Image (cartoon, helix red, strand yellow):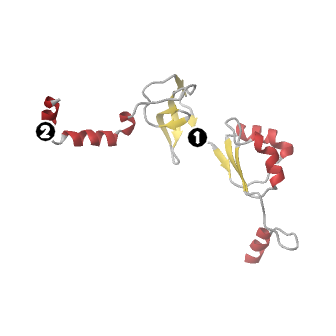
Amino acid sequence: MKQWIAFLRSRPALPFVILFLILLYPDRARPQITEPGNPVLEFTNGRWFDGNVFREKTVYVVNGLISFHSARHFDRVIDLSGGFVVPPFGEAHNHNVEPNKIDALIERYLQHGIFYIKNPNNLPNGRNQVLSKINRSNSIDVTFSSATLRADSGQNLTAMVHSIMR
C-alpha cells in the first residue's frame, strides 16, 4: 500500500487523468448489467436515420434500450445487410381509436411502422374499452385527452374559435 501511495504522489496528475477517462467513457467504467431474459443484441451493417441523413453504424440493444455505445458482450448479432433503419412513426392527431375496430387498427398501424398515436378528442367510455389492448409491447401506444369543449349550440368549440379567427 505504501508503494501505491508513493507511486501516486510521484505522479500528481494521474488521479485526474483517471477521473477524466472515467468521465469521457462512462459506459466503460460501469459493468454491463443485463436483466435476466433480456438478450444483448448487436445490429451490424445498418444505415440508421439520425434525423437528417442515414449513417452506417453498429447499434446495440441492452435491457431493451437502444445504445450507440459498444456492449461488452452480445447474445446475438443481427446483420442488417445494408438495410435502412428509421425510428417508429407516430400519428399526432386522429379520432380513429375506437372499440369496434381496435384490432384491425392496431394491425394496420404496426404494419406501417406507426407505434405512437395521439387522440385529441374521445369519450372516456370508448377509451376504457380499448385500454386492455393498447400501450403494451406488442401493440400501439395511445394517449387520449378524453374530452372536448362544446359551445351551447353543440358545435365544437375549437371549430367555432377557428371560424371566428378567420
Query: Residue at 52% of width from left, 32% of height from top?
Result: 61
Q: CA distance from mark 2 to mark 1?
A: 52 Å
Task: Give the image quarter of residue 12.
Answer: top left
Q: Name the image quarter holding the C terminus.
A: bottom right
Label 2 or label 1, whichever lies nearer to me, is 2
The secondary structure type at the circle numbered 1 is loop
Asked which secondary structure carries label 2, the reply is helix
Estimate how packed mark 2 is, as few (under 14), some (14 to 19) or many (20 or more) residues with alpha carbons within 10 Å.
Answer: few
Instruction: Check the image and report above or below for 56 versus 147.
Output: above
Residue at left offset 76%, top offset 44%: 131
Residue 75 left/right relative to 89: left
Marking on residue 25: none
Q: Which mark is residue 86?
A: 1
Residue on which the image places disc 2: 9
Q: What's under tag 2, amino acid-wise?
A: Arg
In the rendered view, does 153 fall on the left or right side of 96? right
Q: Residues within 10 Å of mark 1 (few under 14, many from 20)?
A: few
Q: Which amino acid type is shown beneath numbered disc 1?
A: Val
Mark 2 or 1 closer to N-term? 2
User: In the rendered structure, are the residues bearing label 2 and label 1 in contact, judged by CB atoms less than 8 Å apart?
Assistant: no
Q: Where residue 60 sits in the image (x, y, percent)?
A: 49, 32
Q: Residue at x 46, y 35 (%)?
A: 57
